[in-house]
Image: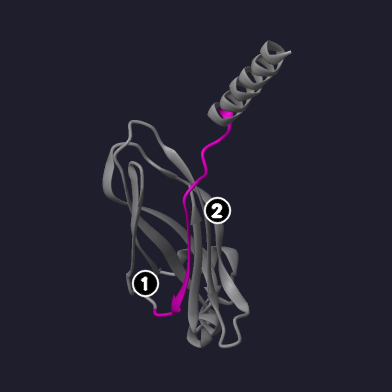
């Protein structure tokens, strides 16, 4: 009887150990809400293993090419912006990052932003990943907060 209980406990331990070893590792998540300012870098400096996310910004682009193409005849009301995230990846493999970056009005309502998947390329130091979009100039003028969620 005692050997059956011991065998059962050992088997259960082995099964739990195997499950723990095959479960996916939890990804790092960075979430924050900061005052919105165009062309301003916001320091993040979060490190998880070989990946460090250094900072983020929303940069106003001079030429509104995307706005002219995707919103013809309305370019006087639109601006092109680029959401940039600076990172370091010291690993020999890429990490896929899921980005959710939005600018919000005074009440916390989303005005516009980016939801995308980006690669943190292997063996890069202080590299920048970016997404460019056309947005309403009015939205940039009334934006009060930048909210971001970065997962890898």
**Magenta residue check for 36:** yes
The image quarter in which residue 22 lies = top right
Q: Which mark is residue 116?
A: 2
Image quadrant holding the N terminus, namely top right
- Residue 63's x, y, as percent? 39, 69
Above or below residue 15? Residue 26 is below
Above or below residue 139? Residue 123 is above
Instruction: From the viewer's side, name the closer residue of 41 and 27.
Output: 27
Whole-Å distance between the Cαs marked 2 and 1? 23 Å
Left or right, 124 with respect to 20, comes to left
The residue furthest left is 125
Left or right, 126 with respect to 75, comes to left
Span colored in magenta: 22-37
Residue in the image at 51% along x and 38% along y:
25
Q: Is residue 95 visible?
A: yes
- Residue 104's x, y, as percent? 55, 78
Instruction: From the viewer's side, name the closer residue of 33 and 25.
Output: 25
Residue in the image at 49% along x and 80% along y:
145
Q: Is residue 73 visible?
A: no
Q: Which residue has dot 1 on it?
A: 62
Instruction: From the viewer's side, name the closer residue of 135 and 152.
Output: 152
Q: Nearer the viewer, mark 2 or mark 1?
A: 2
- Residue 7's x, y, as percent? 66, 14
**Magenta residue check for 51:** no
């Amino acid at each position: 009887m005692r050997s059956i209980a011991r065998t059962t406990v050992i088997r259960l331990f082995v099964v739990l150990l195997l499950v723990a070893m095959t479960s996916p590792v939890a990804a790092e998540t960075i979430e924050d809400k900061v005052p919105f300012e165009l062309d301003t870098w916001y320091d993040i400096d979060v490190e998880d293993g070989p990946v460090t996310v250094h900072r983020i910004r929303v940069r106003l682009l001079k030429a509104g090419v995307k706005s002219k193409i995707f919103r013809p005849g309305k370019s006087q009301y639109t601006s092109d912006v680029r959401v940039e995230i600076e990172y370091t990846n010291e690993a020999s493999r890429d990490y896929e990052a899921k980005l959710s970056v939005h600018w919000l009005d005074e009440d916390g309502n989303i005005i516009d932003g980016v939801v995308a998947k980006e690669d943190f390329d292997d063996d890069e130091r202080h590299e920048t990943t970016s997404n460019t979009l056309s947005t309403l100039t009015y939205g940039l003028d009334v934006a009060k907060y930048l909210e971001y969620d970065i997962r890898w």
